[in-house]
Amino acid sequence: LWEITKQGMEFYSDFFDYAYPFDKYDQIFVPEFNAGAMENVGAVTHSERMVFRDPPTENQRSSRAMVILHEMAHMWFGNLVTMRWWNDLWLNESFAEYMAHLALDESTRFTTAWQAFNARKAWAYRQDQLVTTHPIAGQVADTDQTLLNFDGITYAKGAATIQQLVAVLGMDGFRDAMRGYFRRHAFGNTTLHEFLDALQTGAGDTGGAVGDLHQWARVWLETPSLNTLAASWEVDGDRLSRLAIAQTAPPEYPTLRPHQIEVALVRERGGRLEVEALPVHVEGAETEVPAAIGRPAPRLVVPNHNDHAFVKIALDPASLAFVRGNLQRIEDPLLRQLIWQALWNMVRDQQLRSTDYLDLAAAKIEGERDQELVETILGNVQAAIGRYLPDALRQERAHAVSEVAWRALQTAPTGDLQIIWARALIGLAISPPDIERVARLVDGELAVAGLAIDQEMRWAVAVLYVGYGLPGAQQRLAAERARDPSDRGQRALLRAEASVPDAAVKARAWERFLGEGYGSLHLTAAAMGGFHWWVQRELVAPYVERFFEAAPLVFEQKEKEFAQSFFGALFPSGRVEQAVLDRSERLLAEIGDGWPLLRRSLREANDDLARAIKCRAFAASGG
Ligand SMILES: [Zn+2]
């Protein structure tokens, strides 16, 4: 923490050419803090989650460093210069988000900052494809509406457009622009207009190749949704005879945008894969790339190499075929990550079956050594199993990936990868034999040299025992309680209490959620987290209807944070069924324009559910 704080201070003072403008800088870690962090002048408050209870992985340290650097960037952008009104809130957050990754990459020991940034973009890609998508910049009537917009678009898409702007302006132009901006507006208020003026001046210094930035801002900041790029290419002998990039947009949001990208041409050369990066300015529906003609023929073409742009990528058929056999041979981890992300987007768009994705992951992930990427893929694997796979296939598929994870755990080098694989095994344990096996792991009966079992893993297994009604569950809880009497232990116990597969327990828990609660929002939320189990679907079936009956009242009477926890934990999202979707749509129709927060939550949940239903049907249609 001290090291990152010091490195960040030096980096920002130098990059902005403006010394830290306040007298002191405190970082305060707050129990039960509702947000991630808040950038009060000279006294940032952080969630206690930032203080690790178990030995963290390097990925966790890197994410924490990113949050520290994000809040610190606000001392300049937000506090030294403040936006005039909430409608420019996005710029505050997007800027801090982009700068945090830049600072992470340039001033700290973390070398995977741009891979982490790419993983954050997944959040924005998802959000931007929901029915509730909105322009990055927009009209904000009041602070309630501001809260609704604290989302993946405000943070990650906005940051990605700044990244794209830097790709266009060049880093020197961007830095000069920011230096001018802070000199000129220190201790004052600005709007997007002044920010763009400053950038235009910076662009001027680098030759003014960008055109009118205000025009650029209109298509990027004032229209929602996103574009997909796909390469098409033809080969004549051993040379490329044509390369073109097609750009598409969803029918509801037909805007096409300019994109400054690099295209990776991947070739075989002496038993290795060689990557050539070709800069391309994409504009309009079809962009021909004459510079590619006559170059040695590639085996694989990937638009958006180095991830400069905010676009989805669809792989062409020849490239997809090559990737199936050779993805693991690509040396650049960010390029591998971009391809994995393209595959995941294809699953979400029903262009690739979830079962296909799981086969690919099972075949490739064991050989993957990049931790950032292993975690990203495992996260998507678990999402695919939980949401995009027919119920009948879930346990079998989860077990198959578990087998891979066991082998990977045995052979992983001592350290982070072991922790990542062990956590994945616990997450993938959705059948009694797999749960009993992870129990033997945390009990030390199945020892893996060098792996340190931590308290979070122990709690997770104990709660699994409760949820699945396995023998010895209560003894496990008692043992963990003795080991960990902390507030974390208290929350785990409440989660376990609500997890017991018994109708009377569920009835009592439900009554308490809506009544007196469990003492604090965080304690009540912990108990709510134990209510729904896929394996208890019959038992909790009555609470589908009760949820939709209770929701309007909860959103009317309780505070926003409670209502959001209630919705997040108790909306029956695990039941990927048309009947649930229909019931939810009915409530949406009933509430009309009332309850804006409930309305937004329902629309997003329904959208996710509709997508999951389609993905399951698509997976089930496969041979
Ligand atoms: Zn922020």
Image (spheres, helix red, strand yellow):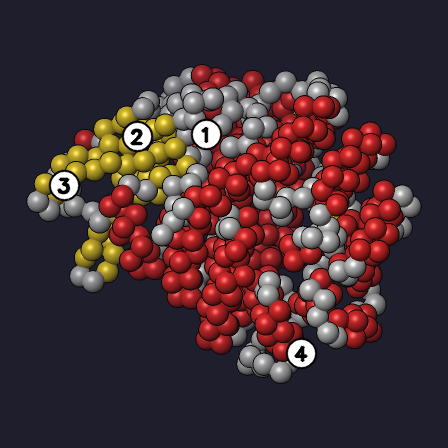
CA gap, disc 2 to disc 1?
Answer: 14 Å
Q: Residue under circle 1?
A: 226
CA gap, disc 4 to disc 2?
Answer: 54 Å
Residue sitting at x 62%, y 33%: 582
Q: Nearer the viewer, mark 4 or mark 3?
A: 4
Q: Secondary structure at mark 4?
A: loop
* Amino acid marked by disc 2: Ala
CA gap, disc 3 to disc 1?
Answer: 30 Å
Q: Residue under circle 4?
A: 443
Mark 3 surroundings within 10 Å by alpha-carbon count, few (fewer than 14), some (14 through 19), many (20 or more): some
CA gap, disc 4 to disc 3?
Answer: 58 Å
Q: Residue under circle 2?
A: 246
Q: Residue under circle 3?
A: 235
Q: Does label 1 or label 4 sit earlier along the sequence?
A: 1
Q: Which mark is residue 563?
A: none
Q: Does label 4 or label 2 sit earlier along the sequence?
A: 2
Image coordinates of residue 138 in percent, x first then y, are: 60, 20
In the foreground, 388 or 451 = 388
Q: Does label 3 or label 1 sit earlier along the sequence?
A: 1
